[in-house]
Amino acid sequence: MSAETAASTDILVVGGGLGGVAAALAALARGRTVLLTEETDWIGGQLTSQGVPPDEHAWIEQFGATRTYRALREAIRDHYRRWYPLTDEARRGRYLNPGEGRVSTLCHEPRVAAAVLDAMVAPYVAAGRLRILYGHRPVAASMDGDRVRSVVVEGPDATNGCYRLHPVEWNIGEAAGSLAAYCLDNRLEAEQVYEDGERLSHFQDELTCAGVELAWPEVKGY
C-alpha cells in the first residue's frame, strides 16, 4: 500500500495462511478490527493456494486441536455432504474423508477449504470489521524498539513455501490473535502478560474457555 492508500486497524495480521486466519478470527471474536494481508488470491495457505491436504497427527479426531480448528474441519465435511453427490455410506460417516487419503482423515480439494474459510470470515467482512488485502506482500516495516509501528505491503506477488503441522499452526495463530486482543483490551504489552503469573493464568483461562488446548495430553505407547 502506498501513503495514499494507508489504512489503520486495531490488529494487523500479515499472511493469510492457517495461522493468520486463526489469529484474525480470534481477534475479531474479541471485538477488534483486523486488517489481513495475503499474497495469493485465497486465504488458507497450504490447504488452499498450495494444494496440500491437512497434515495432521494421528489423534486429530480425539484431541490436539482447538475448538475453532475442529469447526473448520467439520465445516469442510458438511460442505461435501451438502453439495457433493456422495454415497449414502459416505454421507453418514462420522469421519468423512472425501479424498480417502492417508496423510489425514480429512483429505479434500483446495477450493472447498477456500469456500469454507471465506464463509467463516464473511460476517466480519460484511460488518466492516475485517479487511482482506489479497495479492499483497510485506516489503518494509517501521519499528520502535521491538514494537512494529507500521508495515508497508505491495502486490501482487507469489506464494510462500513454509511447511507446518496444520492443527499446530492454527493453534499458534489463534493464541497469538487472542493475545494481541487481550493486550489491547488491558493496555498491556505481551511480555507483561508473560512475566506476570496472575495475568498469564487469567489469559490462559480465557484460552481454555475458548477451546484452545494449552498442553499436549500424555499419549502412551507412542
Image: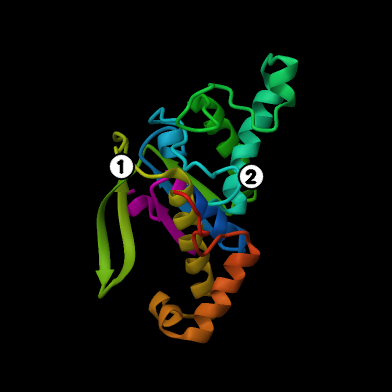
What residue is shown at x 38% (from left), y 30% (from top)?
50
Q: Which residue is mark 1?
A: 162
Residue 171 vs residue 155: left or right?
right
Residue 164 vs residue 90: left or right?
left
Residues in magenta?
Answer: 1-20
Depth order, front residue of 45/143: 45
Q: Is residue 147 above or below residue 196?
A: above
Asked which quadrant contains residue 29, the reply is: bottom right
* Residue 12 among those drawn in magenta: yes
Say which amino acid is labelled 2.
Ala
Residue 201 disc label: none
| Mark 1: few/some/many CA within 10 Å (<14, 14-19, 20+) | few
Q: Which residue is mark 2?
A: 71
Q: Is residue 198 above or below residue 34?
A: below
Depth order, front residue of 57/106: 57
Q: CA distance from mark 2 to mark 1?
A: 24 Å
Disc 1 is placed on an element classified as loop
* Residue 95: x %, y % from top left: 64, 32
Say which amino acid is labelled 1.
Cys
Depth order, front residue of 207/214: 214
| Mark 2: few/some/many CA within 10 Å (<14, 14-19, 20+) | few
Count all numbered tags in the image, as a single digit. Answer: 2
